[in-house]
Image (tube, rainbow, N blue to C red):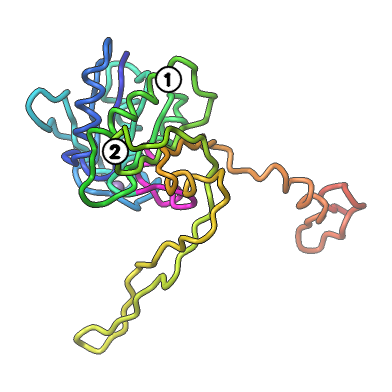
Amino acid sequence: MLILLTNDDGVYAEGLRALARAFAAMPGATVRVVAPERECSAGGHAVTLSRPLHIADVNIGDGMPPAISVDGTPADCVKLAVRALLERPPDLIVSGVNRGPNLSTDVFYSGTVSAAIEGAIHDIPSLAASLTAYQGAAFDDAALIVRAIAEQTLARGLPRHTLLNINIPPLPVAELDGVAVTRLSVARYRDVFDRRTDPRGRTYFWLTGEFLDDEWPEDTDVAAVRRNQVSVTPVQLDLTDHGALEVVRSWRLGLPGERPGPPGAGGGRP
Ligand code: MN
């Protein structure tokens, strides 16, 4: 079984090295690491079109699997690995373990999740994994949890065009309260921008913001992590709001100069 590991914190990040240790010890696993040479956190699903991508063989630690750094984004890394670098498409892609959570609508900004989305686009079972802490992080425990979830996922088979977004509280396994399968919540932040003045008197803004930790429905990812559970959210590529299709069709949207058609007819061509 060929397993591709990547991340958005950079090829030397501790969370990725922990994943490499955990998956290299998996029976029958061949592990390859292809990851950004620099941190790309909150870089989203960007791909690099305006310049070439350079790669380098790197050593991420004694006894570690072969690793390649790419001067691109997490999505670049997955595309390049699948299409050009690996001997064949991997059987599994794991992105992480990210330093910090990737919960709720923050998945739209996450490079960690974007790498797994790219894997799902290529029809490869893909997991994104994040530790919900920035300091004192127990990446080795988290990596073993990710490996256990990966083994169970491979045994069951993931639906096509679906990935799993995993968020792990920073606790020893014995102190966690199991796994919760959750839905994404919708994040809200307070005081999103710091407004400051630079030494030349110009105003500047720094994006910051405090996650509003109010009432979360109990089936959401944020609520599960608050309960010290590992949150696993199935995320699908199809962003269409299927429930809204009929509503928006009933508006009978038209081009300039078109008159509305009969209700329910869709567009109104004269
Ligand atoms: Mn990151």
> Residue shown at 50%/61% (left/top)?
214
Q: Which mark is residue 97?
A: 2
User: In x, y percent, where is residue 175?
Assistant: 33, 37
140 w.r.t. 2: above or below: below
User: In x, y percent, where is residue 117?
Assistant: 44, 36
The quadrant where residue 254 appears: bottom right
Q: Which mark is residue 128?
A: none
Please name the residue that numbered disc 1 is placed on: 152
From the image, which quarter does the C terminus lie in?
bottom right
User: In x, y percent, where is residue 28?
Assistant: 27, 10
| Helix, strand or loop under label 1 | helix
- 77 lies left or right of 55: right
Q: Which residues are magenta?
A: 101-115
Magenta stretch: dominant secondary structure? helix
Amino acid type indicated by mark 2: Val
> Residue shown at 31%/31% (left/top)?
80
In the rendered image, the residue lying farthest to the front is: 175
User: In x, y percent, where is residue 205?
Assistant: 34, 75
189 w.r.t. 239: above or below: below
- 66 lies left or right of 26: left
**Neighbours of disc 1 within 10 Å: few (<14), some (14-19), many (20+):** few
Depth order, front residue of 239/70 = 239
> Residue shown at 35%/53% (left/top)?
42
In the rendered image, the residue lying farthest to the right is: 262
